[in-house]
Structure formats: C-alpha cells, structure tokens
Image: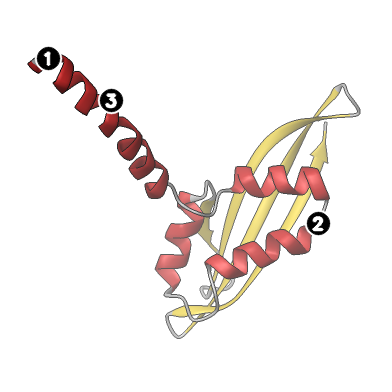
Amino acid sequence: MCKPLLALVALLLIPSELEAKDEAKPSLQFTVLEDDYQWNNDIEKARTTLAREIPPGTYFWSALDVLEEAGAHCTGDRQDPEIARCVYSDWMMVHDYYRANFYWTAVVHLDDGKVGSLTLDRTVEEK
C-alpha cells in the first residue's frame, strides 16, 4: 500500500518541477525573436521586446548578462569604450535551397554605469 502511495505522490510532484524549470528560463531569447520575425517580419516588435527586457537605466553589466543568456556573444568596441556589441547568429534556408546566415546585433551604449541607449538590427548574409 505504501509503494503505490509514494508513486502517486511522485507523479503529482513532476508537473511542479517542470513548471519551476520553465520559470528559470530567461524571458528574452534570440531564437524566439527570430521565430517571431520569420512569422510577422516586424523588426519594431523585436526592438520593443528588447526595450521591455532592458530599459534605459538598467545596470550595464546586467544588460550584457541578459543578452548573453538570450544567446548573444558580447564584446567591447575598441574605438569607443562606452559601447558593447552583442551578436546572435544562426543560419536558415532561403529560396527553398540556399543557406544564409542571419545576425541579430544589439548595441548597448554605456552612460554612467547604466544603459543609456540600446539598438537592435537584423541582417542576412546569403551564401
């Protein structure tokens, strides 16, 4: 009698553990931005999503952490130490046949230790 009861309790706990894992997932993901862009072709929606996640005034290093958790690789700018570029890249098929690389580039401008401004662009490079 005890074993079936333990099995039942274990089964009831599984959904709450799965929900906890979903909550730990970062809210901004470049894969999701790309999927949305492929669906609606709206760069402004992607920019609004990014601005909502990283509003001006966000601590600079926290902003970079959010972008890196979203899948981007961030580096500083050699000419301007108050700029960081975060790039997410992947590939897709175009014209049903050709491979193309796409890049999401977020440029973070530092202002007194915080995000002063943030831009987002998407480019495609066909092979």
Which residue corresponds to the image point at 60% horizontal and 48% vertical from the top-left? Answer: 30
Specify whether residue 78 is in view: no
Q: Is residue 80 left or right of residue 126?
A: left
Q: Secondary structure at mark 3?
A: helix
Tell me the distance, in whole angstroms, between the alpha carbons under discs 2 and 1. Answer: 54 Å
Badge 2 amino acid: Asp
For label 1, the SS is helix
Assign the C terminus to one quadrant of the image.
top right
Does label 2 or label 1 sit earlier along the sequence?
1
Check the image and report above or below for 6 versus 73: above
**Which residue in the rendered view is the most extreme toward the right?**
95
Instruction: Identify the mark nearer the N-term, 2 or 3.
Output: 3
Tell me residue 20's x, y (percent): 34, 44
Give the Cα separation between the discs numbered 3 and 1. 12 Å
Mark drawn on residue 82: none
The image's mark for residue 3 is 1
- According to the image, label 3 marks what residue? 11
Q: CA distance from mark 2 to mark 3?
A: 42 Å
Camera-nearest residue between 32 and 85: 32
Q: Which mark is residue 42?
A: 2
Position of 19 with respect to 116 (left or right) is left
Q: Position of residue 83 (x, y in %)?
A: 56, 71
Residue at (43% x, 47% y) in the render: 25
In the image, residue 61 sits, relative to residue 31, either above or below, namely below
Of residue 81 and residue 87, the one placed in the foreground of this image is: 87
